[in-house]
Structures are given as structure tokens and as C-alpha cells.
Image (tube, coloured by chain):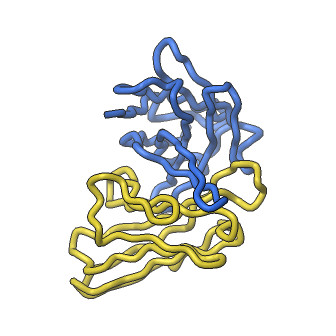
Chain colours: A blue, B yellow
Amino acid sequence: QVQLQESGPGLVKPSETLSLTCTVSGGSISSYYWSWIRQPPGKGLEWIGYFYHSGNTNYNPSLKSRVTISEDTSKNQFSLKLSSVTAADTAVYYCARASSAMYSSKWYDWFDPWGQGTLVTVSS
Amino acid sequence: SSDLTQDPAVSVALGQTVRITCQGDSLRSYYASWYLQKPGQAPVLVIYGKNNRPSGIPDRFSGSSSGNTASLTITGAQAEDEADYYCHSRDSSGNHLGVFGGGTKLTVL
């Protein structure tokens, strides 16, 4: 059974770079694609981006200029870097395994499983 | 603003049926997935695609889609179904970008 665990600093200063790692256990990171999702306190979910084991990425257009998602296959981990953070980036950050399939010519994606999430606060 | 629109709050009497909807142009081209989230916990997948349930999800949860609307139906709502529910799908760009609905808080009375 695949499990995911986020790790990284819980406090980041404004204008600095937020860095988080997701460690995947119980399965190979090379077998699926992966995603980061965040949730500001008291608000809804926001998709951040995908990392495909081909090395390609897709990012939320609203964050694209500041986001990098990459992987370390030797450690079975993938990471998130978000630069030039502000208080608006304060959120619980989740990593998740992503999958896609097609039925009747319509694609669909889903996230399962998810990590437990880690709160990152941006404050001086 | 989100490309997927959900009612902020819905209520249902214990044991009754409730439908939670998600509207957006991209849903004409893509199916949605649905997640429930209880306070302090990570979201959990409950429905994906046309109407697929992960193992361990009760069969009172079902999904459907028509036009620009995806729906999650709970038939015989239980107290433990009280949670926030989010839909997810691709956006309208066709570039495999994701988008979540704003979420629906379900209260079981």
C-alpha cells in the first residue's frame, strides 16, 4: 500500500523559497505521476502542479512563474519549491499520487492516496 | 475564482438522499473526481470518473454527469458523512491542468 509523507520547514520568511519533500513508500515513484495541492487555512483546495516520471511538469498558471516540482528517484521522493513567498502562500501543503484514465472518450484524473499534509506559515 | 462551481453548503436529514453538484464548462469534456475532507484530515477520494468508487468507500456514494454538471449523490446519508466535499477536474485549456471546485460543506441533521 502506497503511503506519502510530506516534510520540510514549517516556517518560511517572506520573499524566501518554500521547499517541501514528499517521500513515497510502498511503491515506486517511477510508476505514476505526482501532484502537490495546497489549502490555505479555512479555505478550499488549490492544485499546484503535476510531475510526470518522464520529467515533464504542468503547473497552475497562477503559480507557474514561482513553482518547480522535481523528483529524486534514488530516494523515491519528489519535491516542491515555491519562490518569493508571501503570507498568501501560508497553507497546508499536500502531496498526492495522480492517475488518469479515459471512458467514452472523456478523460478523468484522480488523486489517491494523499499525504497527511504539512502546514507552512509564511511570516517574518 | 474557480472554473468549477459548488454550492457552499448543503444539508440533509439523517438517512435521506443528498446530491452535491459541481458545474463548469470543462465538465462537458472531462469527468470529475470527488473528495471528502473532515476537519484536520487530508482529503479522501470517494468517486472518480463516470462512477468509480475506491475500495473501502461505501456504496451509498455514487457519481453522475450531465452536460456541464457533475454530481455526487449520497443515498441514505450517515452522520459520519458530514464533511467538506470537493470536486476536481481538468480545466478548459486542454493542457492537463487541474482545478478544484470551491467545496461544499455537508451538514447531516
Residue lying furthest top = A74
Q: Nearer the viewer, residue A121 or B45?
A: B45
The residue under the point 66% across, 72% down is: B24
Instruction: Give the side of residue B1 with respect to residue A102, left or right.
Output: right
Q: Position of residue A119 (x, y in %)?
A: 43, 42
Q: Position of residue A105 (x, y in %)?
A: 66, 59
Query: Is A73 placed above or below A99 here?
Result: above
Instruction: Give the side of residue A109 with respect to residue B3, left or right.
Output: left
Instruction: Give the side of residue B49 with respect to residue A53, left or right.
Output: left
Q: Quadrant of residue A51?
A: top right
Q: Quadrant of residue B99?
A: bottom right
Q: Nearer the viewer, residue B63 or A97?
A: B63
Q: Position of residue B26 (x, y in %)?
A: 69, 66
Q: Nearer the viewer, residue B73 or A23?
A: B73
Q: Say which quadrant the N terminus of chain B sits in.
A: bottom right
Query: Is A20 placed above or below A117 here?
Result: above
Q: Say which quadrant the C terminus of chain B sits in.
A: bottom left
The residue under the point 51% across, 54% down is: A40
Figure disc tally: 0
The residue under the point 61% across, 51% down is: A88
The residue under the point 65% across, 68% down is: B27
Q: Quadrant of residue A13?
A: top right
Q: Position of residue B22 (x, y in %)?
A: 56, 74
